[in-house]
């Protein structure tokens, strides 16, 4: 079974190219179901999840030029050509959707274009319940009839699937990125105006809206919590560049802080790091936007402890909580981390403790008392971001760290071992 092996103690220095964002690419792939014309995505990351959604979309009739996607992270396919001249199946089957919860994003586009959809309830990382109730609530507000049958969401538009979705006012009781994306896509082909309140504002949502606008969608309020979508009769094809991955950029920025390093994160956007940049600066890691990327430099031997609370964007991202915890593990002082998004996102804590970390967890609160030194150990990845946190810990540890169950890692990081090795880390993948 494949492992990532890290020998810690090296200071990172150099340039790392930041890949296109997985969390942007997945909803962008789903837009092919909204149009019969070709859609091309550039800067598309080569990840396991991209391959999974490729297979889902092909099942619906999409023609996708992605011969090397899904064969393992690192095979490389920066351009993705998609064309769905007709919907050949409205069913997204369990065996595919269960591998990745983002597959639920085909629900809105299928309903909007075809009037009917049968989508299995999704799977993915076991970091919390992450229900799809907000997706269904919004579609029902737009006139869809929804039933849960044998583990599938069975939905149809008015008039038994022959009518169009209807514009509606949708008030999200809590912020949901996936529900916002699904409903924005559905609303582009609905009849009339849809208004969304408390919509997600993440850069990935903004990227999706910009792509849809280039296809002829009428969307205003992009980048705010109040989105207004006026439905159109059809959408055209487009070519769109996937935004750089802020979570990958943030992970590498933390790596610089943990190793006393200095990095240029090519293509990264400092404004997308949001609250992480503030936390890093307080810890002693300075991030500056420069031509072509983000300059990250550690200014002291050990970082300072900083309290962190995860929140919807522009607050601190839950997808960087585990990595930041690794930084706090080697910091001076005590840090309190509070996870407000998911109820089960501290599964990396026992593995960090195996490496010498001092962490106490009480519900959604983790108290981290920094230690001077971590020690390499065999550890196991429990989810995608936990995988990254353990690699970061390995970079700062004394001795060898062996990370198993790295299939989680390949869902969201493209060639992470090659990128870190190129800037001085001693890290390799062993089959």
Image (cartoon, rainbow, N blue to C red):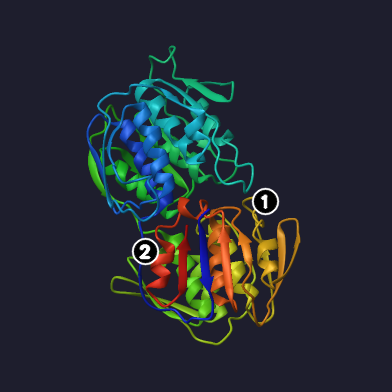
- Residue in view at x 32 percent, y 31 percent: 34
Q: Residues within 10 Å of mark 1 (few under 14, many from 20)?
A: few
Q: Is residue 276 left or right of residue 22?
A: right
Give how far apart the Cα atoms at labels 2 and 1 are: 28 Å
Task: Write down the residue under mark 2.
Answer: 18
Q: Is residue 169 above or below residue 51?
A: above
Residue 429: % across, % down: 46, 62
- Residue in view at x 62 percent, y 49 percent: 127
- Residue in view at x 42 percent, y 15 percent: 161
Task: Write down the residue under mark 1.
Answer: 344
Quarter occupied by residue 121: top right
Q: Nearer the viewer, residue 406 or 161?
A: 406
Quarter occupied by residue 59: top left
- Residue at far top of view: 160
Q: Is residue 335 left or right of residue 289?
A: right
Q: Is residue 331 above or below residue 145?
A: below
Q: Nearer the viewer, residue 34 or 95?
A: 95
Q: SS class of the residue under badge 2? A: loop
**Residue 410, disc:** none
Residue 353: % across, % down: 70, 67
Q: Is residue 309 visible from the viewing direction of this image?
A: no
Q: Is residue 403 visible from the viewing direction of this image?
A: yes
Q: Residues within 10 Å of mark 2 (few under 14, many from 20)?
A: many
Residue 248: % across, % down: 44, 62
């Amino acid at each position: 079974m494949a492992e990532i092996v890290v020998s810690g103690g090296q200071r990172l220095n150099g340039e790392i190219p930041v890949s296109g964002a997985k969390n942007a690419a997945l909803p962008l792939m789903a837009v092919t179901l909204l149009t019969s014309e070709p859609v091309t995505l550039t800067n598309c990351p080569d990840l396991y999840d991209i391959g999974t959604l490729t297979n889902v979309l092909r099942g619906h009739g999409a023609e996708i030029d992605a011969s090397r996607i899904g064969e393992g992270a690192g095979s490389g396919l920066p351009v993705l050509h998609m064309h769905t001249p007709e919907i050949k199946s409205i069913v997204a089957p369990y065996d595919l959707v269960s591998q990745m919860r983002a597959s639920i994003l085909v629900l809105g586009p299928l309903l909007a274009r075809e009037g009917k959809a049968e989508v299995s309830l999704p799977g993915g990382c076991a970091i919390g319940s992450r229900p799809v109730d907000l997706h269904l609530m919004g579609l029902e507000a737009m006139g869809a009839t929804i039933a849960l049958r044998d583990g599938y969401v069975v939905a149809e538009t008015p008039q038994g699937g022959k009518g169009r979705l209807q514009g509606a006012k949708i008030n999200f009781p809590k912020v949901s990125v996936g529900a916002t994306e699904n409903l924005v896509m559905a609303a582009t082909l609905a009849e009339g105006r849809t208004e969304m309140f408390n919509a997600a504002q993440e850069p990935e949502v903004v990227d999706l809206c910009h792509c849809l606008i280039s296809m002829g969608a009428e969307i205003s309020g992009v980048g705010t919590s109040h989105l207004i979508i006026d439905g159109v009769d059809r959408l055209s094809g487009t070519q769109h560049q996937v935004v750089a991955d802020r979570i990958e950029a943030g992970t590498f920025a933390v790596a610089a802080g943990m190793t006393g390093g200095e990095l240029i994160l090519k293509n990264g956007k400092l404004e997308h790091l949001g609250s992480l940049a503030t936390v890093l600066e307080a810890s002693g890691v300075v991030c500056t936007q420069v031509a072509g990327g983000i300059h990250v430099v550690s200014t002291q031997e050990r970082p300072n402890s900083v309290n962190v609370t995860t929140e919807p964007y522009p607050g601190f991202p839950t997808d960087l909580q585990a990595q930041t915890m690794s930084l706090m593990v080697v910091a001076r002082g005590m840090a309190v981390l509070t996870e407000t998004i998911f109820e089960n996102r501290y599964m990396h804590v026992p593995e960090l403790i195996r490496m010498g970390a001092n962490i106490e967890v009480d519900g959604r609160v983790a108290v981290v008392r920094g230690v001077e030194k971590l020690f390499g150990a065999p550890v196991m990845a429990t989810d995608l971001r936990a995988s990254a946190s353990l690699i970061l810990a390995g970079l700062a540890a004394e001795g060898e760290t062996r990370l198993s169950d790295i299939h989680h890692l390949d869902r969201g990081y493209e060639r992470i071992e090659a990128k870190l090795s190129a800037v001085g880390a001693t890290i390799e993948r062993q089959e």
